Image (cartoon, coloured by chain):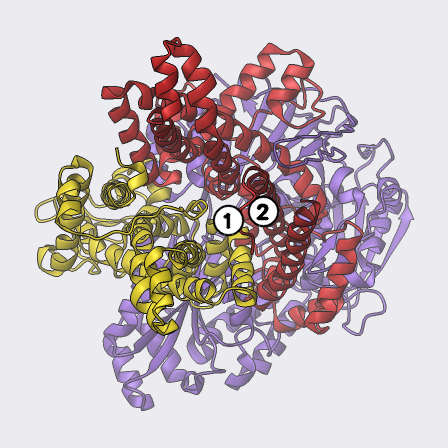
Amino acid sequence: MFRFILRRTLQAVVTFVALTAILFAWLRSLPGGPLDALLGENASPQDRAKLVESLGLDAPLWTQYLRYLGRFWTGDLGVSTGVWRGAPVTEVLLTRAPATIELALCALVVGAVLGVAAGYWAATRRGVFDVAFLGFSVLGLAVPVFFTGFVLKYVFAVRAGWLPPSGRADLSGSIPTPTGLTLLDSLLAGSGAAFVESLRYLTLPTIALTIIPFAVIFRLTRASVAETLQQDFVRTANSKGLRNPTVAGRHVLRNSLLPVITVIGLQAGGLFAGAVLTETVFNYRGLGQSMALAFSTRDYAVLQALIMIAAVLYLVINIVVDIAYALCDPRVRTP
Amino acid sequence: MKFKKTGVIAVAGVMLLTSCSSESGTPAKGTGDGSGSKVLVFGAAGAPSLFDPFYTSDGESARVNNQMFEGLLSLKPGTADPAPGLAVSWEQSKDGKQWTFQLREGVSFHDGTAFDAAAVCANFERWYRQPKIARTSAVSHTWVNDFGGFEGDKTPSLYAGCEAQDKSKVVLRLTNPSSKFPTILAHGTYAMSSPAAMEKYNANGVEAKGEGFAFPEYGRLHPTGTGPFAFVSYDDSTGTVKLARNDKYWGEAPKITGVEFRTIPDETARRQELEAGTIHAYDLPAPRDWQSLKDQGFQVVTRPPFNVMYLGLNATTVPELKDLRVRQAIAWAINKQQIVDTLLPEGSETVTQFVPRSVEGYDTAVEGYPYNPDKARALLAEAGVPNLKIQLWYPTEVTRPYMPEPKRFFDLIKADLEAVGIQIEPVAKPWAGGYLSGREAGEAPVYLLGTTGHYNSAQNFLGILFGATDNAFDTGLLGFGQELVDDLKEADSEPDPQKRVGMYLEINRKMSEDWLPSIPIASSPSALVLHGSVRGIVTSPVGGEPLATATFGE
Amino acid sequence: MTTAPAVPRRRTATARPGAQTLRRLLRQPAFLIGSVITFVFVLVAIAAPVLAPHDPAAPLLLDQVRAQSNPVPLPQEGFPLGGDPAGRDLLSRLVAGAQQTLVVGVMATLGGFVGGIALGLVAGVFAGKVDMLVMRAVDVMLAIPSLLMAFSIAALFAHPSEWTLILTIAIVQVPVFARLMRGSMLVQRDTDHVLAARALGVKPGAIVFRHMVPNALGPVIVQATLSLAVSILDAAALSFLGLGNPDDGRPEWGQMLGGAQQYFNSFPHLAIYPALCIIVVALGFTLMGESLRETLDPRTRR
């Protein structure tokens, strides 16, 4: 088992290093780049030449990559050129990460709780609820995420005025913000008002972002529960005269949830991509929005760091899932 | 302030948060959530890049920095013309190479140190003695454009020295007379910073890292000027800059207690915030929204046009463009009035020169090339290229104040050119992903672009575009390139303003009639939208309006 | 935003799309609705040039357009939905958009399908080193969330166009198909009829192409139906972020929706029409794909 874990981890590390090299070369082979954004529209060829020279970008690519790795090793991911000009990339990430973590966690928790509850409900009761939820989940997958965002914003913020149209709660003036997670900070400070304020800002983006995980989790739970219900042990339990809630809790849910948990894990990676769109629509200053911004300003340093983070997240989640499978089922064939 | 915040996050559902938050900085005197309180909340399109005016040239930074900093000169409200600032008066020597400024007395920086002649010279010396790494136009953009070189450079510098004659009298020496003086001193870049603060926070400590530059603490956390508002904080996690009223301001203190700039990149979102009442003002509403914003009771105040949108030409890849007749044919072929009518807001106008109509040196007698496809066809035939095939470049991923939705400009121009028999090969390139660099390298034979001015001088427009022969238009290929450079240099160093304007008129006429390096098309106004209750903001053609005069009415 | 398909199903259907399957399919309302939508969509797409009242690229109403006072031409005679900001007939653009949307969806899915099948086949047939290498490459591709990868690829092209958009979405789909195909092939390798064929001494090539591939394709084809919806949605997302096809002469719904975002406040109809089209069509493909999957996969059959 230990050897299996070690092997998977080593593979992940190799994948990661390969990815840094590919990304580095790839981004730098693109036309344009951060220099364009730095120089602006009235620059002359001489300005560019001078800039290239002073930044040492006339060196061969592999030299630049080694330099990058050298800095990377010391925890220096470079400097942002577009998202937050002049700030170290690590600082950009640290300031922006809490927002995305908060949003993604909210979306995941809401999606998982509602998805499992509705899935179980639909599978056991059937009928109108089943059809309605099923319809909603299929529809949820068919609507472009950013359009959902637009509509939510228009209806609930602009027309009705119930919720703020965009942004994040700014608590820095009122309570200490040690974690940067607005909900947690308000709880730590015991401030109900700040909590409500944070919630008001989080509601719409969370709804927009959670629709897809909800749909996926709902459908899987529904299918899984339905399958479990057909199995012998449930029938046995039922025929033994065990009360329904016991059967539900002890037998059905527990046996149905394993695949669901796997999918919840895998959804986390997809959430980051969804966050790019949701955060852009709601001007929610997290990593997703900085990703979009980094693209339009060709902020390679930030871009590279963000893609690496997404990759690490994915690799770690995958290893965890693989290990979980290996633990459950020793037959699992690993390449 | 949030700069020292660290959040370390472990994955796989386990979250581990460590933190060390330092609540430093001035306690916000008047920061609140905006509505009801006396803080003006402004929706900005982009985050300011840095709070050190010398290292910034973008409008978003200028908007913030203009509230905190002041230069020797200021702009007369509502114009791009110079007015007294930290200097109350100035005079030029006979040869035009020496300027003497009488400084305002009793002015102090936000850190309490006094503003005096020594401080002025300390600022100029700091600019002139930039570290090697900061001497590119990507860092010291405006200085490179206006003054040229730095201390010890091969490129000559316009700056020759600064001398504090007494506490409130300072003498600036130039290497040659220049049309830019004294107007450029009103440009936000040349605002005065506290020498003590610059020293303390290592203002010049720019470092190169990978593709970018790391800036020192001064410009990121401790900007210290003399202006009506002082820096409180910048929080990147909310994209908010907070400024508080400077109660020791030498002039009339602002009525509002502070200003808050909130970054909202999406134009639609800015409008929604205004409608929701969470911001009081935002910049650059799209023309299509002007009317409906007014209908909703907001004030849409326009700025006089101070930009030029042009069709750039470059003969590097298409030798046919070296022929004046071909360039003229393209100019005749374009229906400029239609572009102004359908794509630009009211108040836009066609231009025949590379300067807006309001700038001294614009020759109203020049007729330019009003739409005439027949003449275009005739000229093409005469030049022997009736079937010219050419690339037309347009940028994606961008909108500029002079060119909202570039693709639509492209559509109209493409149709116009095709109508006279020119075959168009469309080339779309991302703005920062090949468009700008391709154009600089001369790969784009015909392309869409524009330029925006910073102060009222023809040199401000022409010098930047055509001040060298190996510029992005490669005017060196066109025969007259050097002459144009020389003419511009001569006009720039003419000390007599009257004579100088005459020289610019002449250059503009020749550029339109004899040379036509590229084709100027239109000049358009931009707007600022304010909540119905905001009073006292006067728009400026160059943007970055002072907000100190703002009040909340009923 | 595709979800990586879960671990290969061990009991994937040995689908024989016979009369029985078809009958089961036709009994499902979801399949019926899905196929009707798809049918109408394809019909409109094919007949678009005939159906569209005007040339979708011609700025017929340009004279009415004024950036400030009349940015979007109103509905009027001959133009029931009015024009777009460039003065082109909105209805014609929606109709023509069906064609272009179909082209982008089908081509992108086809690209991903072919690429994925090839990789999955190679991995599934040659076990060991090759398998490991291919799957590692697929892992690297999957390591970047699909939309992020799409952004990166879209940004790679010097001349963004319709084809770069298609290629981008296709590449993003490749790993999904590859994984599915490999899993499916592995399952086939252990089935009785393959073992039997091997025992009978059938040549490896024949086993692979005659016995394994046809049976392995089932789940992959189902995935393709679902990928059609994903492709259309991804194209819209890319356009929203400004990374789509800049040439709007031949409109595509995602592009129309992406381009309308700035008009959402004053002219929401510009966004709502293409959005509705996208939603309905994506719904159609999804319903069809889902019911196919359910019918062909006995595990979920009840």
Residue B323 screen position, x and y as percent: 41, 86
Residue B114 screen position, x and y as percent: 87, 35
Residue C41 screen position, x and y as percent: 17, 50
Res C160 seen here: no
Say left or right for C15 vs B220.
left
State the residue at coordinates (44%, 12%). A246
Which color is chain A depicted in? red
Q: Which one is nearer the viewer's eye here, B465 or B361?
A: B465
- Vertical arrangement, residue B249 with respect to residue B518, above or below: above
Task: Identify residue type, mark 2.
Answer: Ala
State the residue at coordinates (16%, 51%). C18
Dot 1: chain letter: C
Task: Identify residue type, mark 1.
Answer: Pro
In contact (CB < 8 Å): disc 2 and disc 1: yes
Chain coloured yellow? C
Disc 2 is placed on an element classified as helix
- The quadrant holding residue A26 is bottom right
Quadrant for the N terminus of chain B in the image: top right
Dot 2: chain letter: A
Q: Check residue C145 in the rendering and tell me which mark sits there, or answer none.
A: 1
Residue A10 screen position, x and y as percent: 69, 54
Q: Check residue B158 in the rendering and tell me which mark sits there, or answer none.
A: none
Q: Check residue A310 in the rendering and tell me which mark sits there, or answer none.
A: 2
Say left or right for B482 vs C97.
right
Which color is chain B depicted in? purple
